[in-house]
């Protein structure tokens, strides 16, 4: 039997989530997909930009995630924007449900990656940033970039 490598192959990242939210915790969840959707994701045709998660009846779903239809698919292609179920332990879902309801936090998909051949979604428990927080983050990134540039010039 061939050994499987423990490589994580990142397919998509939600950069907008890090700009709009403070990520307090992150969780790994499996996702329920159909065959042609998996093939499309392997081609990198997935978009997490406007995606969010909600909890209904003890199950967690991701909404707004776009998986383009598979090019060589047929009638088995699914709606690209359909609601997809995430697979997590019941205790984790109950914990997240309590935090989302009490503290006013939200669940945002941060990245999608393959782990041992299975697609996983990294879900973040996030708190929204205010406009001044976003400006502060941008200013900090600019200052770090400038410092690295100056340091690089002095070392040459």
Image (cartoon, rainbow, N blue to C red):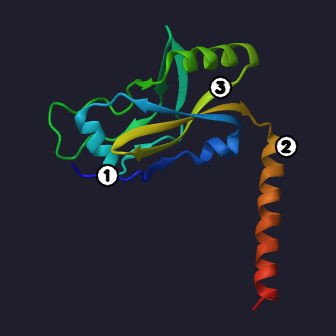
| Residue assigned mark 2 | 132
Label 2, label 3: how many angstroms apart (C-alpha)? 20 Å
Q: CA distance from mark 1 to mark 3?
A: 29 Å
Q: Report the residue at 49% width, 7% height from top.
A: 57
- Circle 2/circle 3 CB separation < 8 Å: no
Q: Which residue is mark 3?
A: 106
Kindly identify which residue carries mark 1: 43
Front in this rendered view, residue 57 or 71: 57
Label 3 CA crowd tier, 10 Å (few <14, some 14–19, many 20+): many
First-in-chain label (2 vs 3)? 3
Q: Which image quadrant is residue 39 in? A: top left
Horizontal side, residue 43 vs residue 94: left or right: left
Q: Nearer the viewer, mark 1 or mark 2?
A: 1
Spatial separation of the CA atoms under disc 1 and disc 2: 38 Å
Q: Residues within 10 Å of mark 1 (few under 14, many from 20)?
A: few
> Horizontally, is 105 left or right of 28 in the view?
right
Rendered location of residue 17, percent (x, y): 63, 41
Dot 2 alpha-carbon crowd within 10 angstroms: few under 14, some 14 to 19, many 20 or more: few
Q: Secondary structure at mark 2?
A: helix
Residue 104, given in percent of the width and then of the height, sits at 73, 20
Assign a secondary structure to mark 1: loop
Q: Position of residue 54 (x, y in %)?
A: 54, 20
Does residue 122 lie above or below 58 as drawn?
A: below
| Residue lying farthest to the bottom in this orientation | 156
């Amino acid at each position: 039997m061939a050994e499987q490598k423990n490589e994580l192959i990142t397919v998509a990242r939600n950069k907008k989530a890090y700009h709009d939210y403070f990520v307090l915790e992150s969780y790994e969840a499996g996702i329920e997909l159909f065959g042609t959707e998996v093939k499309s994701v392997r081609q990198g045709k997935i978009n997490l930009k406007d995606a969010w998660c909600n909890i209904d009846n003890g199950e967690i779903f991701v909404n707004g995630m776009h998986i383009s239809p598979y090019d060589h698919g047929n009638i088995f292609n699914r709606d690209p924007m359909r609601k997809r179920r995430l697979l997590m332990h019941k205790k984790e879902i109950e914990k997240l449900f309590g935090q989302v309801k009490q503290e006013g936090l939200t669940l945002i998909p941060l990245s999608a990656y393959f782990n041992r051949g299975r697609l996983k979604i990294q879900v973040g428990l996030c708190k929204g940033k205010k406009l001044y927080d976003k400006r502060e983050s941008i200013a900090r990134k600019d200052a770090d970039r400038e410092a690295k540039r100056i340091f690089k010039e002095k070392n040459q």
